[in-house]
Image (spheres, helix red, strand yellow):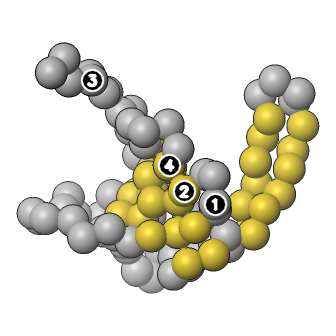
Amino acid sequence: MNNISIFDTVGLTWHYAMASGNILTYRVGNTTVLGADGNSVIVYGGTTDNYASYSTEVWTLDVNTFTWVKPIVKGSPPRYTFFSNAILVYTPSKT
């Protein structure tokens, strides 16, 4: 997934960028949300287009540099998550 399609919601136009870093494998049905920092996109799960394998990987894409990173995630992931929806709820710390 190194070819990134970008939709400009203000100008209503499409742009394209090439991503770098460790490129995640092709998948469909993954879940994607904007990160709490507003500068990253988080991708989780998905399956190959023929449903031969399922992913429990988490990847982040830095939207400023278009660099993919596979973070170290702790705990047991949900199994076989694909074609699902997600939202990110972020409450900033008041400290």
Tell me, yes or no, whether the two marked residues, 2 and 1, touch with CB atoms within 8 Å. yes
Amino acid type, label 2? Asp
Q: Does residue 35 sit above or below 83 in this rendering?
A: above
Amino acid type, label 4? Ser
| Disc 1 to disc 4, C-alpha distance | 10 Å
The residue labelled by disc 3 is: 92
Say few, some or many: other residues with alpha carbon within 10 Å of mark 3 (under 14 / 14 to 19 / 20 or more): few
For the residue labelled by badge 1, is the local secondary structure a helix, a strand or a loop? loop
Residue 70 picture location, percent across and down? 38, 72
Name the foreground residue: 76 vs 49. 76
Of label 1 and label 3, which has the lower sequence position? 1
Of label 3 and label 4, which has the lower sequence position? 4
Name the foreground residue: 2 vs 84. 2
Q: Does residue 33 sit above or below 42 in this rendering?
A: above
Say few, some or many: other residues with alpha carbon within 10 Å of mark 1 (under 14 / 14 to 19 / 20 or more): some
The residue labelled by disc 1 is: 65
Residue 38 appears anywhere in the view: yes
Tell me, yes or no, whether the two marked residues, 2 and 3, touch with CB atoms within 8 Å. no
| Disc 3 to disc 4, C-alpha distance | 17 Å
The residue labelled by disc 2 is: 62
Tell me the quarter of the picture where residue 44 sits.
bottom left
Amino acid type, label 3? Pro
Q: Does residue 82 sit above or below 2 in this rendering?
A: above
The residue labelled by disc 4 is: 40
For the point 31% across and 27% down, the residue is: 89
For the point 45% across and 60% down, the residue is: 60
Say few, some or many: other residues with alpha carbon within 10 Å of mark 4 (under 14 / 14 to 19 / 20 or more): many
| Disc 2 to disc 4, C-alpha distance | 4 Å
Name the foreground residue: 79 vs 86. 86
| Disc 2 to disc 3, C-alpha distance | 20 Å
Of label 2 and label 3, which has the lower sequence position? 2
Instruction: Give the side of residue 55 with respect to residue 12, left or right.
Output: left
